[in-house]
């Protein structure tokens, strides 16, 4: 297998090594998907719709938060079992872009169906189920989307391009959240006659999110070329694909063990990162008493900070390596999260100045946003440097699987910590434990430039 640290070829498809020069049109079209996906990440799963799901009409914040956590844990199991096979089959069948489109459309449909989740305890499980299913298909789409990184970047720009994609996602989140705030949340009667009665304004936000994602996902589906079918690819059945997967995992461990070590370490800390975003708005509302409007204002500010962090982190990634970026970011996340946990919503007097609970969350919550972007972007760029040419989909499938194999950790520890300590605030403790475990697991892992390319058997 060739490796990106070797000699790149000029071809832009995934069946050949990374191209010498980037195609800006392809990069912009690819990043547009990140921009559109912000409606799912920022609005649906972090700051708006999940906050709506854990509000009092659905049975109380603590109970609904537990159900949401457990629902996302179940979706993680499904992703862990299926993601690498979807990536493997899209690689060999030359259908990466096709499956990106199919899974994106599934997310769009499920998000739109959230319009029918009325503010009543009887709709809690319906809402959680729709969010969990959308999460599954979103991760399947991510497998193919991440694998495209090798098609549109070069060895010297992979970190920058990855960071640009994350930044586009954050900026897209700013714009989408601002439109949601102005059109559906702040006005007594918003766009399309939306009012707060029966949660109509928030249910229409789900429709808005679906349309937003659809519009901005289209460019990559019509611009970035489809990869060719591998000429010697065997037509494997579903279960035979698992047999090939296990043989390849053994070969990766034998020929490039640090690739496996990175997959395992990143699985842990990425689960903690996902929990920061999933439960951030929930904690702001439930523990710190933020109104939905205040949550959205914080989300807009947080996305500005996160976008800056992703861009700067991406530039530094290409210069000093992704591992240093990830380690520094995880340390920052742990310090900021610990401050939120310890200080809580109480008011303190420090050197004559008053520190309220709101101020605590604004300061350290924005710190969490600042460090989350670089950690996510550099993790993606790290694996993009390691994946053998033509096998990016399967490797990012493993990336999703190892992540989801432990994805029960943060949601479960979040819910369990609430159960043990009796208040939502201590759910933060569960997230911090996962982030710390991921940091400790990453420390012995080598930088990509020191890791040999995995040699894997063909189908």
Image: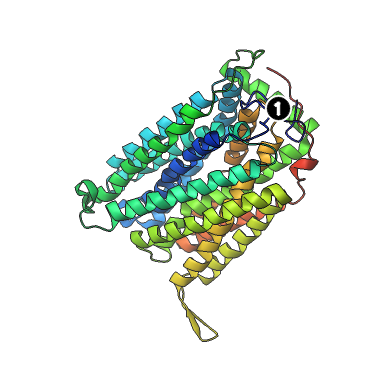
Residue 399, percent from left and from top: 62, 37
* Residue 237 image-quadrant placement: top right
* Residue 312 image-quadrant placement: bottom right
Residue 325, percent from left and from top: 67, 53
Residue 145, percent from left and from top: 54, 34
Classify mark 1: residues with Cα within 10 Å, few (<14), some (14-19) or many (20+): some
Identify which residue is drawn at 54% across, 33% down.
26
- On the question of residue 199 being in view, the answer is yes
Left or right of 130, for residue 69: right
Identify which residue is drawn at 60% across, 34% down.
152
Residue toward you, 338 or 37: 37
Identify which residue is drawn at 60% across, 39% down.
405
Residue annotated with mark 1: 9
Left or right of 353, for residue 149: right
Looking at the rendered structure, the secondary structure element under dot 1 is loop
- On the question of residue 439 being in view, the answer is no
Left or right of 230, for residue 298: left
């Amino acid at each position: 297998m060739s490796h990106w640290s070797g000699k790149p070829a000029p071809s832009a498809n995934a069946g050949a090594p990374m191209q010498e020069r980037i195609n800006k049109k392809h990069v912009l079209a690819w990043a547009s998907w990140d921009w559109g996906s912000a409606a799912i990440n920022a609005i649906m799963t972090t700051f708006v719709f999940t906050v709506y799901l854990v509000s009092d009409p659905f049975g109380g914040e603590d109970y609904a938060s537990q159900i949401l956590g457990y629902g996302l844990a179940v979706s993680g199991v499904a992703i862990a079992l299926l993601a690498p096979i979807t990536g493997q089959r899209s690689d060999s069948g030359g259908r990466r872009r096709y499956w990106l489109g199919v899974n994106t459309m599934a997310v769009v449909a499920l998000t739109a169906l959230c319009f029918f989740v009325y503010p009543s305890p009887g709709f809690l499980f319906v809402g959680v189920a729709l969010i969990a299913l959308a999460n599954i298909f979103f991760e399947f789409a991510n497998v193919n989307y991440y694998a495209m990184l090798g098609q549109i970047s070069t060895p010297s720009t992979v970190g920058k391009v990855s960071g640009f994609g994350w930044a586009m996602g954050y900026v897209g989140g700013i714009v989408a959240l601002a439109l949601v705030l102005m059109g559906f949340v702040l006005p007594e009667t918003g766009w399309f006659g939306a009012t707060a009665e029966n949660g109509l304004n928030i249910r229409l936000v789900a429709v808005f999110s679906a349309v937003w994602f659809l519009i901005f996902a289209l460019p990559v589906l019509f611009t970035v070329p489809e990869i060719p079918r591998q000429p010697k690819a065997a037509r494997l059945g579903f279960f035979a694909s698992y047999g090939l997967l296990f043989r390849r995992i053994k070969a990766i461990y034998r020929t490039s063990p640090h690739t496996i070590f990175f997959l395992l370490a990143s699985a842990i800390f990425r689960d903690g990162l996902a929990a920061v975003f999933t439960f951030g708005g929930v904690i702001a509302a439930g523990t710190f008493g933020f109104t939905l409007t205040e949550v959205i204002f914080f989300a807009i500010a947080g996305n500005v900070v996160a976008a800056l962090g992703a861009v700067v982190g991406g530039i530094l990634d290409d210069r000093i390596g992704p591992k240093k970026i990830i380690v520094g970011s995880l340390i920052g996340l742990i310090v900021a999260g610990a401050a939120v946990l310890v200080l809580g919503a109480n008011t303190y007097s420090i050197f004559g100045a008053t520190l309220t609970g709101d101020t605590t969350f604004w300061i350290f919550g924005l710190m969490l946003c600042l460090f989350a972007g670089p950690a996510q972007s550099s993790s993606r760029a790290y694996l993009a440097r390691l994946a053998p040419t033509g096998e990016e989909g399967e490797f990012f499938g493993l990336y999703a699987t190892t992540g989801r194999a432990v994805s029960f950790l943060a949601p479960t520890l979040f819910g369990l910590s609430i159960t043990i300590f009796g208040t939502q605030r201590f759910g933060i403790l569960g997230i911090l434990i996962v982030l710390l475990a991921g940091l400790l697991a990453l420390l012995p892992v080598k930088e990509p430039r020191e890791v040999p390319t995995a040699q894997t058997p063909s189908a």
